[in-house]
Amino acid sequence: MQQHDLSKAVEISNGIHWVGTGTKTFLSRNAYLLCYHGQEKLNSMLIDPGPTVDLDILIHKVSEVLGSITKVNAVFLNHQDPDVVGNAPYMARSNPNTLMLATEDTWRLVSLSGLDSTKFRAVERFKNMRIVMPTGHKIQFVPTPFCHFRGACMLYDIESRILFSGDFMGGIAATQLFATRANWSGIKAFHQLYMPSNEAIRLAVRRIRDLQPTPIMIAPQHGSIIQEEDIPYFLDQMENLKVGLDIITTFDKIMPEMIAGLNEIIATVGKTIGEENVTNTMKMFHADGSYPAIFALSRDGKITEIKGDPMESIESLIRMFFRNCSENQKSILKSIILKILILRNLPTFDTLLTEQYPPEVELFEDTSASDTSIPALASY
Ligand SMILES: [Fe+2]
Ligand SMILES: [Fe+2]
């Protein structure tokens, strides 16, 4: 796979540049600069300018392409989160003619940072939610309600067939600009935590499938860009994903028991592989601060909350413990953890089950003479 120099702007399609932060943080931010070349005109639109901590990077990368960030004509905001709109006030100040595009629901909150509403254009006010740039280029706005904000809206660039999808289809722990199917686990984890329900996801998936012409890239605000050949795969995966409330309501009743079981497992594992080993393993579940840790811990190191899918979180913790175990320790721990889960009536995991069971024992009929020395058996 081609490696890109992410310290610079990357042209992902003709006139369309990635101007994001790269892959150094767990939750990387992607901003995109769309340059529309007309006969004598150049119009540019910046999508999701990012948080204030990314401003220097943004200035550098946009200036590489346009000469100056003041030349940006329009800014599109998918929704109002600080990781999306933090730099919007700077953009407005650096060029007071910059138009701001978003849904009205998004703008109501973004405008609280003192932005001039005369420069705001509500995307739902345009006929069919479509606009034509002065250069003739067409853009379609595609709302994704409750993915994850009620006013969230994607932007589809019809000529390049790139869909700028905001948080939807975004992922954590991306290591390269373009996604492979291995990115699914990071996308899944991000959606399980940030998206409210599978119902909201299904609507967004349907809207992407309905786009004409079909997109050849999905460019989210976090993680890697999904290319044409993988789009059906990721949409299929996404369509069936349980997230947010789906997970909470499914596990609501057994969650206290799961947390208690998990704390018992951690205490038991400590006795076998040592407390220090356990502490170091738990540290690996803390993200870099740009993303929530999977487990919330009390001061004395006890788990108080499981975020994301609890089954997957527990299984990945068990797998991490096993990494530091000898084969003998692993086999003892498997049996002990299995016992804890069974006694607490909690589901078990494939990781705990032995892959190679000894074959079923064969029992033979006793064909020897019947003058057995244990006649008492007959009376049972
Ligand atoms: Fe967000
Ligand atoms: Fe975001």
Image (cartoon, rainbow, N blue to C red):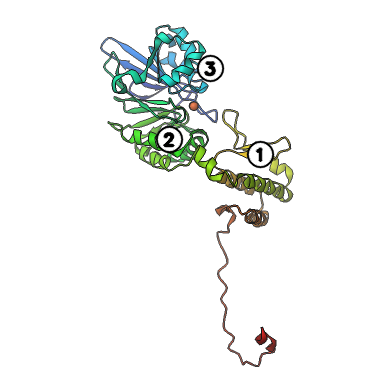
Q: Earlier in the sequence, mark 3 or mark 2?
A: 3
Looking at the rendered image, the disc whose residue lies closer to the viewer, 1 or 3, is 1
Type of the residue with mark 3: Thr
Q: Is residue 128 left or right of residue 235?
A: left
Position of the N terminus, as image quadrant, is: top left
Rendering quarter of residue 143: top left
Residue 64 x, y percent position in the rendering: 43, 15
Answer few, some or many: residues within 10 Å of disc 2's Cα (few below 14, many 20 plus, some between 14 and 19).
Answer: some
Tally the marks.
Answer: 3
Q: Is residue 71 visible?
A: no
Please give the label number shown on residue 200. 2
Residue 34 x, y percent position in the rendering: 36, 19
Of helix, strand and loop, which one carries label 1?
strand
Q: Residue at x 57, y 28 (%)?
A: 290
Please give the label number shown on residue 357. none
Q: Earlier in the sequence, mark 2 or mark 1?
A: 2
Q: Give the answer, above or below, for where 175 lies relative to 250.
A: above
Type of the residue with mark 2: Ala
Position of the C terminus, as image quadrant, is: bottom right
Residue 186 x, y percent position in the rendering: 50, 37
Q: Residue at x 54, y 40 (%)?
A: 248
Type of the residue with mark 1: Thr
Location of mark 3 (residue): 52
Q: Are marks 1 and 3 in contact (CB under 8 Å)?
A: no
Answer few, some or many: residues within 10 Å of disc 3's Cα (few below 14, many 20 plus, some between 14 and 19).
Answer: some
Q: Residue at x 67, y 37 (%)?
A: 297
Rendering quarter of residue 41: top left
Please give the label number shown on residue 304. 1
